[in-house]
Amino acid sequence: QKKWGMFFDDFKKHFKEKVEDFTFIHSLVTTENINDLLLKDCPQGKVDLLSIDLDGNDYFIWKAINTLHPKIVVTEVQVEKGNIDFIPEYTRGFETFESGVPKGASPVSMIKLADEKGYELVAANKQGYNLFFVRRDCMSNLKAMGVTEMLKNIVK
């Protein structure tokens, strides 16, 4: 936690004593190491919420995860790709700046992956670039949403 410096201090300010309930992993994440990283810090594989925000490789990282099945997964998508099926090339490089080149998978592609993994889309943030998926066995009274409905609700 000391590695995180100011980020951890800000997080602690908001979550106070509950900050110890969170696990922070500081690493360059790849499809080859994601499962080892998760098992190292979550050996029982019990995770309620997993947020994947990698500016481009989100699709590939979630696809590679097979060591845990969280109740909720939040992924970033390239909402500008709209209603088309688009998966970018996987890249091992890390870009420290935004080049303006779309890097993420489209909402359609991410929803298809979620379906394969047993999840349903239930919400998106106002701009549509973060999608919230719930594992099917945890849906209870939640209503699944399709990509058309999600795109219709985007605030521009």
Image (cartoon, rainbow, N blue to C red):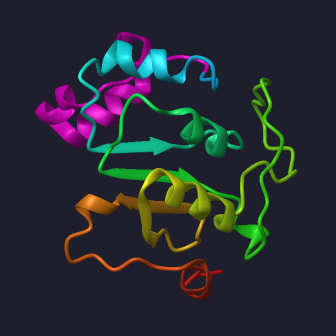
Q: Is residue 137 left or right of residue 147?
A: left
Q: How many marks on residues? A: 0
Image position of 152 with respect to 79: above or below: below
Q: Nearer the viewer, residue 117 or 156?
A: 117
Q: Is residue 59 above or below residue 40?
A: below
Q: Nearer the viewer, residue 98 or 153?
A: 153
Q: Is residue 19 one of those drawn in magenta?
A: yes
Residue appearing at x 41%, y 50% in the figure: 73
Quarter assignment of residue 156: bottom right
Q: Quadrant of residue 119?
A: bottom left
Question: Bounds of the magenta span?
Answer: 1-28
Q: Position of residue 152 (x, y in %)?
A: 60, 88
Q: Residue at 50% of width from left, 33% of height from top?
A: 65
Q: Is residue 13 magenta?
A: yes
Determine which quarter of the picture holds residue 155.
bottom right
User: Which is nearer the eye, 98 or 105?
Assistant: 105
13 relative to 3, above or below: below
Using the rendered image of the protein, determine whether residue 25 is visible from the camera's viewpoint: no
Q: Horizontal placement of 33 versus 81: left or right?
A: left
Majority SS type along the magenta span: helix
Query: Quick check: 100 left or right of 116?
Result: right
Which x, y percent locates residue 153? 54, 85
Q: Residue furthest left?
A: 17
Q: Residue 4: percent from the left, percent from the top?
A: 43, 19
Q: Which quarter shows the N terminus?
A: top left
